Image (cartoon, rainbow, N blue to C red):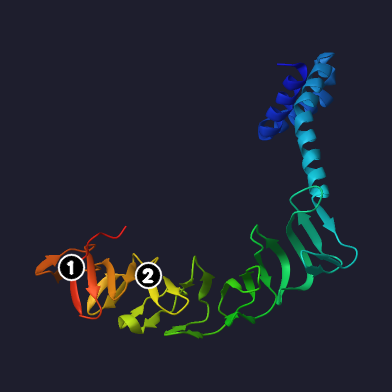
Protein backbone atom coordinates (compact mmCIF):
# COMPACT_ATOMS: atom_id res chain seq x y z
CA UNK A 1 0.00 0.00 0.00
CA UNK A 2 1.43 3.39 -1.02
CA UNK A 3 1.76 6.23 1.48
CA UNK A 4 -1.08 8.07 -0.29
CA UNK A 5 -3.36 5.04 -0.08
CA UNK A 6 -2.47 4.56 3.58
CA UNK A 7 -3.40 8.13 4.51
CA UNK A 8 -6.54 7.97 2.39
CA UNK A 9 -7.48 4.79 4.24
CA UNK A 10 -6.91 6.50 7.61
CA UNK A 11 -9.05 9.48 6.56
CA UNK A 12 -11.86 7.18 5.42
CA UNK A 13 -11.63 5.09 8.60
CA UNK A 14 -11.69 8.19 10.77
CA UNK A 15 -14.66 9.61 8.90
CA UNK A 16 -16.65 6.38 9.07
CA UNK A 17 -16.11 6.03 12.80
CA UNK A 18 -16.39 9.73 13.63
CA UNK A 19 -18.70 8.96 16.54
CA UNK A 20 -15.70 7.25 18.19
CA UNK A 21 -12.76 9.34 16.97
CA UNK A 22 -14.39 12.76 17.44
CA UNK A 23 -15.07 12.39 21.20
CA UNK A 24 -11.59 10.95 21.71
CA UNK A 25 -10.04 13.85 19.78
CA UNK A 26 -11.97 16.40 21.85
CA UNK A 27 -10.97 14.66 25.08
CA UNK A 28 -7.31 14.56 24.13
CA UNK A 29 -7.39 18.19 23.03
CA UNK A 30 -8.82 19.24 26.40
CA UNK A 31 -6.27 17.08 28.20
CA UNK A 32 -3.37 18.52 26.22
CA UNK A 33 -4.53 22.11 26.64
CA UNK A 34 -5.31 22.09 30.35
CA UNK A 35 -2.78 19.45 31.44
CA UNK A 36 0.33 21.33 30.38
CA UNK A 37 1.74 21.47 33.92
CA UNK A 38 1.78 17.77 34.66
CA UNK A 39 2.09 16.40 31.10
CA UNK A 40 5.18 18.43 30.30
CA UNK A 41 6.46 17.81 26.81
CA UNK A 42 4.02 14.93 26.40
CA UNK A 43 1.25 17.47 25.96
CA UNK A 44 2.48 18.06 22.41
CA UNK A 45 2.18 14.38 21.67
CA UNK A 46 -1.34 14.36 23.09
CA UNK A 47 -2.30 17.41 21.02
CA UNK A 48 -0.74 15.86 17.90
CA UNK A 49 -2.76 12.67 18.35
CA UNK A 50 -5.92 14.76 18.90
CA UNK A 51 -5.25 16.67 15.68
CA UNK A 52 -4.59 13.43 13.81
CA UNK A 53 -7.90 11.98 14.98
CA UNK A 54 -9.80 15.20 14.25
CA UNK A 55 -8.38 15.71 10.74
CA UNK A 56 -10.46 13.02 8.94
CA UNK A 57 -13.67 14.23 10.59
CA UNK A 58 -12.90 17.84 9.69
CA UNK A 59 -11.98 16.89 6.13
CA UNK A 60 -15.16 14.85 5.72
CA UNK A 61 -17.28 17.64 7.21
CA UNK A 62 -15.77 20.23 4.88
CA UNK A 63 -16.40 17.95 1.92
CA UNK A 64 -20.06 17.54 2.90
CA UNK A 65 -20.40 21.30 3.37
CA UNK A 66 -18.89 21.89 -0.07
CA UNK A 67 -21.27 19.36 -1.61
CA UNK A 68 -24.20 21.06 0.06
CA UNK A 69 -23.07 24.38 -1.42
CA UNK A 70 -22.28 22.96 -4.86
CA UNK A 71 -25.46 20.90 -5.17
CA UNK A 72 -27.93 23.65 -4.41
CA UNK A 73 -28.73 27.15 -5.54
CA UNK A 74 -30.79 29.85 -3.86
CA UNK A 75 -32.57 31.94 -6.48
CA UNK A 76 -32.24 35.71 -6.34
CA UNK A 77 -34.59 36.06 -9.30
CA UNK A 78 -37.34 34.03 -10.98
CA UNK A 79 -35.96 31.13 -13.00
CA UNK A 80 -37.45 28.36 -15.13
CA UNK A 81 -36.10 24.86 -14.46
CA UNK A 82 -37.63 21.61 -15.76
CA UNK A 83 -40.40 23.66 -17.33
CA UNK A 84 -41.39 25.13 -13.96
CA UNK A 85 -41.07 28.81 -13.09
CA UNK A 86 -39.52 29.00 -9.64
CA UNK A 87 -39.82 32.29 -7.80
CA UNK A 88 -36.96 34.25 -6.28
CA UNK A 89 -36.29 32.95 -2.77
CA UNK A 90 -36.71 29.31 -3.77
CA UNK A 91 -33.79 26.97 -3.10
CA UNK A 92 -33.12 24.36 -5.79
CA UNK A 93 -31.17 21.18 -5.10
CA UNK A 94 -29.46 18.96 -7.69
CA UNK A 95 -27.87 15.52 -7.80
CA UNK A 96 -24.73 16.73 -9.58
CA UNK A 97 -22.31 19.62 -9.11
CA UNK A 98 -23.01 20.84 -12.65
CA UNK A 99 -26.60 21.34 -11.51
CA UNK A 100 -28.10 19.57 -14.49
CA UNK A 101 -29.98 16.79 -12.67
CA UNK A 102 -32.77 18.34 -10.62
CA UNK A 103 -33.65 16.69 -7.30
CA UNK A 104 -35.86 18.93 -5.18
CA UNK A 105 -36.74 22.48 -4.20
CA UNK A 106 -37.76 24.44 -1.14
CA UNK A 107 -40.57 26.77 -2.18
CA UNK A 108 -41.15 30.01 -0.27
CA UNK A 109 -44.19 30.90 -2.35
CA UNK A 110 -47.03 28.88 -3.86
CA UNK A 111 -45.70 27.56 -7.16
CA UNK A 112 -47.78 26.12 -9.99
CA UNK A 113 -46.47 22.81 -11.35
CA UNK A 114 -48.50 21.24 -14.16
CA UNK A 115 -51.59 23.06 -12.89
CA UNK A 116 -51.14 22.04 -9.24
CA UNK A 117 -50.20 24.61 -6.54
CA UNK A 118 -47.29 23.39 -4.39
CA UNK A 119 -45.65 24.93 -1.33
CA UNK A 120 -42.72 23.87 0.87
CA UNK A 121 -40.45 20.99 -0.16
CA UNK A 122 -41.08 19.29 -3.51
CA UNK A 123 -39.18 16.43 -5.16
CA UNK A 124 -38.92 15.14 -8.72
CA UNK A 125 -38.30 11.42 -9.31
CA UNK A 126 -36.59 9.75 -12.26
CA UNK A 127 -39.90 9.33 -14.09
CA UNK A 128 -40.75 13.03 -13.99
CA UNK A 129 -43.33 12.66 -11.21
CA UNK A 130 -43.64 15.45 -8.64
CA UNK A 131 -44.29 14.97 -4.93
CA UNK A 132 -44.83 17.66 -2.33
CA UNK A 133 -47.35 19.65 -0.32
CA UNK A 134 -50.58 20.76 -1.98
CA UNK A 135 -51.09 24.39 -0.97
CA UNK A 136 -54.91 24.22 -0.99
CA UNK A 137 -57.72 21.76 -1.68
CA UNK A 138 -57.97 21.16 -5.41
CA UNK A 139 -59.58 18.71 -7.81
CA UNK A 140 -56.90 16.77 -9.72
CA UNK A 141 -57.89 14.36 -12.49
CA UNK A 142 -61.45 14.43 -11.15
CA UNK A 143 -60.44 13.57 -7.56
CA UNK A 144 -61.11 16.17 -4.81
CA UNK A 145 -57.68 16.27 -3.17
CA UNK A 146 -57.03 17.63 0.30
CA UNK A 147 -54.24 20.10 1.00
CA UNK A 148 -51.19 18.27 2.27
CA UNK A 149 -49.05 15.51 0.80
CA UNK A 150 -49.80 14.91 -2.88
CA UNK A 151 -48.14 13.45 -5.95
CA UNK A 152 -48.72 14.08 -9.65
CA UNK A 153 -47.36 12.24 -12.65
CA UNK A 154 -45.29 13.81 -15.42
CA UNK A 155 -48.41 14.73 -17.39
CA UNK A 156 -50.13 16.41 -14.45
CA UNK A 157 -52.51 13.53 -13.67
CA UNK A 158 -52.99 12.37 -10.11
CA UNK A 159 -50.51 9.98 -8.55
CA UNK A 160 -51.77 10.04 -4.95
CA UNK A 161 -53.62 12.23 -2.45
CA UNK A 162 -56.12 12.15 0.42
CA UNK A 163 -59.70 13.02 -0.48
CA UNK A 164 -60.87 16.36 0.86
CA UNK A 165 -64.53 15.33 0.61
CA UNK A 166 -66.70 12.29 -0.12
CA UNK A 167 -66.39 11.15 -3.72
CA UNK A 168 -68.28 8.69 -5.91
CA UNK A 169 -66.13 6.35 -7.98
CA UNK A 170 -68.34 3.93 -9.93
CA UNK A 171 -70.21 1.94 -7.25
CA UNK A 172 -68.02 3.13 -4.38
CA UNK A 173 -69.02 6.07 -2.18
CA UNK A 174 -65.57 6.90 -0.87
CA UNK A 175 -65.47 8.93 2.37
CA UNK A 176 -63.32 11.98 2.94
CA UNK A 177 -59.85 10.99 4.11
CA UNK A 178 -59.56 8.04 1.70
CA UNK A 179 -56.03 7.75 0.34
CA UNK A 180 -56.16 7.46 -3.45
CA UNK A 181 -53.05 6.00 -5.07
CA UNK A 182 -52.51 5.01 -8.69
CA UNK A 183 -51.37 1.39 -8.71
CA UNK A 184 -49.72 -0.64 -11.42
CA UNK A 185 -51.40 -1.02 -14.77
CA UNK A 186 -54.95 0.31 -14.82
CA UNK A 187 -55.65 0.00 -11.09
CA UNK A 188 -56.27 2.41 -8.22
CA UNK A 189 -55.42 1.63 -4.60
CA UNK A 190 -58.09 3.08 -2.31
CA UNK A 191 -56.98 3.12 1.35
CA UNK A 192 -60.09 3.64 3.45
CA UNK A 193 -59.87 5.82 6.57
CA UNK A 194 -59.80 4.21 10.01
CA UNK A 195 -63.34 5.16 10.92
CA UNK A 196 -65.40 4.52 7.76
CA UNK A 197 -66.12 1.54 5.55
CA UNK A 198 -67.54 1.36 2.02
CA UNK A 199 -70.49 -0.56 0.58
CA UNK A 200 -69.51 -2.85 -2.32
CA UNK A 201 -72.60 -3.61 -4.35
CA UNK A 202 -70.93 -6.26 -6.51
CA UNK A 203 -70.28 -8.32 -3.36
CA UNK A 204 -73.50 -7.32 -1.57
CA UNK A 205 -71.14 -6.52 1.30
CA UNK A 206 -69.56 -3.66 3.18
CA UNK A 207 -65.78 -3.34 3.35
CA UNK A 208 -64.62 -2.44 6.87
CA UNK A 209 -62.61 0.70 7.66
CA UNK A 210 -58.82 0.82 7.26
CA UNK A 211 -58.48 -1.64 4.39
CA UNK A 212 -57.22 -1.19 0.83
CA UNK A 213 -59.45 -1.74 -2.18
CA UNK A 214 -57.70 -2.45 -5.47
CA UNK A 215 -60.06 -1.27 -8.20
CA UNK A 216 -59.56 -1.12 -11.96
CA UNK A 217 -60.03 2.06 -13.96
CA UNK A 218 -63.43 0.75 -15.08
CA UNK A 219 -64.60 0.12 -11.51
CA UNK A 220 -64.04 -3.64 -11.10
CA UNK A 221 -62.89 -4.76 -7.64
CA UNK A 222 -59.76 -6.92 -7.84
CA UNK A 223 -58.92 -7.38 -4.19
CA UNK A 224 -59.21 -6.21 -0.60
CA UNK A 225 -56.03 -6.17 1.48
CA UNK A 226 -54.67 -5.00 4.85
CA UNK A 227 -57.67 -6.62 6.51
CA UNK A 228 -56.44 -9.85 8.12
CA UNK A 229 -57.80 -8.71 11.49
CA UNK A 230 -61.11 -7.52 10.02
CA UNK A 231 -64.22 -9.29 8.75
CA UNK A 232 -66.38 -8.88 5.65
CA UNK A 233 -69.57 -10.89 5.09
CA UNK A 234 -70.05 -12.08 1.49
CA UNK A 235 -73.16 -14.18 0.72
CA UNK A 236 -73.61 -14.85 4.46
CA UNK A 237 -70.03 -16.14 4.73
CA UNK A 238 -67.70 -14.37 7.18
CA UNK A 239 -64.34 -13.82 5.50
CA UNK A 240 -61.19 -12.11 6.57
CA UNK A 241 -61.03 -8.78 4.75
CA UNK A 242 -58.07 -9.98 2.72
CA UNK A 243 -59.45 -11.48 -0.46
CA UNK A 244 -59.27 -11.45 -4.23
CA UNK A 245 -61.94 -11.31 -6.90
CA UNK A 246 -61.43 -13.33 -10.08
CA UNK A 247 -64.27 -13.06 -12.55
CA UNK A 248 -67.44 -13.91 -10.62
CA UNK A 249 -65.58 -15.68 -7.82
CA UNK A 250 -64.35 -14.37 -4.49
CA UNK A 251 -61.45 -16.20 -2.90
CA UNK A 252 -60.56 -15.66 0.72
CA UNK A 253 -60.19 -17.18 4.19
CA UNK A 254 -62.92 -17.94 6.70
CA UNK A 255 -63.10 -15.48 9.57
CA UNK A 256 -65.03 -17.94 11.75
CA UNK A 257 -65.79 -21.69 11.65
CA UNK A 258 -68.33 -22.49 8.93
CA UNK A 259 -69.76 -25.49 7.11
CA UNK A 260 -68.27 -25.72 3.61
CA UNK A 261 -68.44 -28.74 1.28
CA UNK A 262 -70.56 -30.57 3.87
CA UNK A 263 -67.98 -30.31 6.64
CA UNK A 264 -67.18 -27.91 9.44
CA UNK A 265 -64.18 -25.83 8.41
CA UNK A 266 -61.88 -23.93 10.75
CA UNK A 267 -60.89 -20.26 10.76
CA UNK A 268 -58.36 -19.54 8.02
CA UNK A 269 -59.67 -22.20 5.63
CA UNK A 270 -59.45 -20.93 2.06
CA UNK A 271 -62.77 -20.87 0.28
CA UNK A 272 -64.21 -19.73 -3.03
CA UNK A 273 -67.61 -18.04 -3.37
CA UNK A 274 -69.31 -18.09 -6.75
CA UNK A 275 -71.21 -14.79 -6.81
CA UNK A 276 -73.38 -15.83 -9.77
CA UNK A 277 -74.41 -19.23 -8.40
CA UNK A 278 -74.28 -18.26 -4.73
CA UNK A 279 -72.28 -21.39 -3.86
CA UNK A 280 -69.33 -21.82 -1.51
CA UNK A 281 -66.54 -24.35 -1.98
CA UNK A 282 -63.01 -25.01 -0.84
CA UNK A 283 -60.59 -22.92 -2.84
CA UNK A 284 -57.89 -24.46 -4.98
CA UNK A 285 -55.23 -23.45 -5.72
CA UNK A 286 -54.56 -21.71 -2.45
CA UNK A 287 -54.09 -17.98 -2.13
CA UNK A 288 -50.59 -16.86 -1.36
Residue appearing at x 24%, y 60% in the figure: 285
Query: Quick check: 99 left or right of 273?
Result: right
The total of numbered circles placed on residues is 2
| Image position of 10 with respect to 280: above or below | above
| Image position of 70 with respect to 171: above or below | above
Eye-nearest disc, 1 or 2: 2
State which tag comes first along the sequence, 1 or 2: 2
Query: Quick check: 145 left or right of 284?
Result: right
Residue appearing at x 73%, y 67% in the figure: 120
| Mark 1 lies on residue | 257
**Residue 242: which quarter of the image?**
bottom left
Q: Is residue 230 visible?
A: no
Residue appearing at x 27%, y 77% in the figure: 233
**Residue 142: which quarter of the image?**
bottom right
Question: Residue extending furthest right?
Answer: 76
Label 2 secondary element = strand
Residue appearing at x 74%, y 25% in the figure: 8
Q: Mark 1 to mark 2: distance in Å?
A: 22 Å
Q: Point out residue 89 in the picture as x, y percentages from the top left corner.
A: 85, 65
Quarter of the picture containing the C terminus is bottom left
Which sits in the foreground, 37 or 277?
Answer: 277
| Image position of 156 with respect to 12: above or below | below
Query: Quick check: 71 left or right of 220?
Result: right
C-beta proximity under 8 Å, tags 1 and 2: no
**Residue 263: which quarter of the image?**
bottom left
Which sits in the foreground, 216 or 203?
Answer: 216
Q: Which mark is residue 115?
A: none
| Mark 2 lies on residue | 223
Which sits in the foreground, 259 or 130?
Answer: 130
Mark 1 nearby-residue class (10 Å; few <14, some 14–19, many ≥20): some
Q: Point out residue 239 in the picture as x, y percentages from the top left corner.
A: 27, 71
Amino acid sequence: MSDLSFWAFLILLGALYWFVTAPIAVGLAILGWYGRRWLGRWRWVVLAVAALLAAPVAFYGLNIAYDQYALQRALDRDETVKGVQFYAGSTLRFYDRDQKLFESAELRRVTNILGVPFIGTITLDGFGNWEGTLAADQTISGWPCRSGRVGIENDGTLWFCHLASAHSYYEYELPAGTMVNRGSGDTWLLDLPRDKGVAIRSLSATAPPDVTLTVTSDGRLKSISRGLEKTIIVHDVSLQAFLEVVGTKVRGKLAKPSVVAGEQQSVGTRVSIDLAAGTVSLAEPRLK
